[in-house]
Image (cartoon, helix red, strand yellow):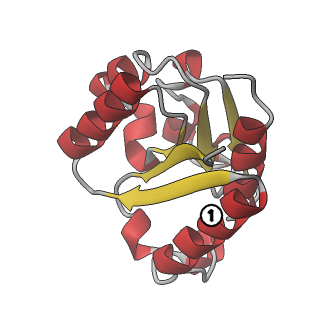
């Protein structure tokens, strides 16, 4: 049996991990995050593909791809989390399990970060555990029935 494919999608500024506000986001680079996700996925029997973009349109396209293929998604939408209704609408089309992740805890930060416009259309949300948030999200997907 082949491994279940999962897309790990990262939005704006996440390509700057390791140098962007390390006191909040840590010192792990995006490349190291991608390697950790693939390793965690492999342990869980998942084939993990990690992508990052600063483009809202590209992220929406990737979600359409996941919707069409029935592929589960782990999504760190970055700032798009708080205002992108286009992203929310694309994510709502993904019938497979979807997990919203954040490295930090948005509820413990600036007030504009307290609202997630995507929270109502994801299977679940995990935040505040640094890169461990991704491993938890992959574990949730691996344990899902879809």
Q: Which residue is mark 1?
A: 37
Which type of secondary structure does the marked residue at label 1 adopt? helix
Q: Tell me if I can see residue 130 in this picture.
A: no
Residue 93: quarter of image: top left
Residue 89 picture location, percent across and down: 34, 17
Residue 115 picture location, percent across and down: 54, 28
Q: Quadrant of the C terminus?
A: top right
Residue 137 picture location, percent across and down: 70, 45
Residue at 61% x, 83% y is: 27
Q: Is residue 66 or residue 125 the one in the foreground?
A: 66
Residue at 63% x, 76% y is: 26
Q: Is residue 2 or residue 102 the one in the foreground?
A: 2
Residue pushed farthest front?
A: 1
Residue at 53% x, 69% y is: 34
Residue 62 picture location, percent across and down: 31, 40
Residue at 54% x, 34% y is: 72
Tell me: residue 97, above or below residue 48.
above
Tell me: residue 12, above or below residue 114.
below
How busy is the neighbourhood of tag 1: few (under 14 within 10 Å), some, or many (20 plus)?
many
Q: Tell me if I can see residue 79 in this picture.
A: yes
Number of callouts: 1
Q: Quadrant of the N terminus?
A: top right
């Amino acid at each position: 049996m082949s491994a279940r494919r999962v897309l790990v999608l990262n939005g704006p500024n996440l390509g700057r991990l390791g140098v962007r506000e390390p006191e909040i986001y840590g010192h792990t680079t995006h490349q190291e995050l991608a390697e950790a996700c693939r390793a965690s996925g492999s342990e869980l029997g998942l084939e993990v593909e990690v992508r990052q973009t600063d483009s809202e349109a590209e992220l929406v396209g990737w979600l359409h791809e996941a919707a069409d293929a029935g592929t589960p998604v782990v999504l760190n939408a970055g700032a798009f989390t708080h205002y992108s209704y286009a992203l929310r609408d694309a994510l709502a089309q993904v019938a497979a399990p979807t997990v919203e992740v954040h490295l930090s805890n948005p509820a413990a930060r600036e007030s504009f970060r307290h609202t997630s416009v995507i929270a109502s259309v994801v299977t679940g949300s995990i935040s505040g555990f640094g890169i461990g948030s991704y491993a938890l999200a992959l574990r949730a997907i691996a344990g899902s029935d879809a």
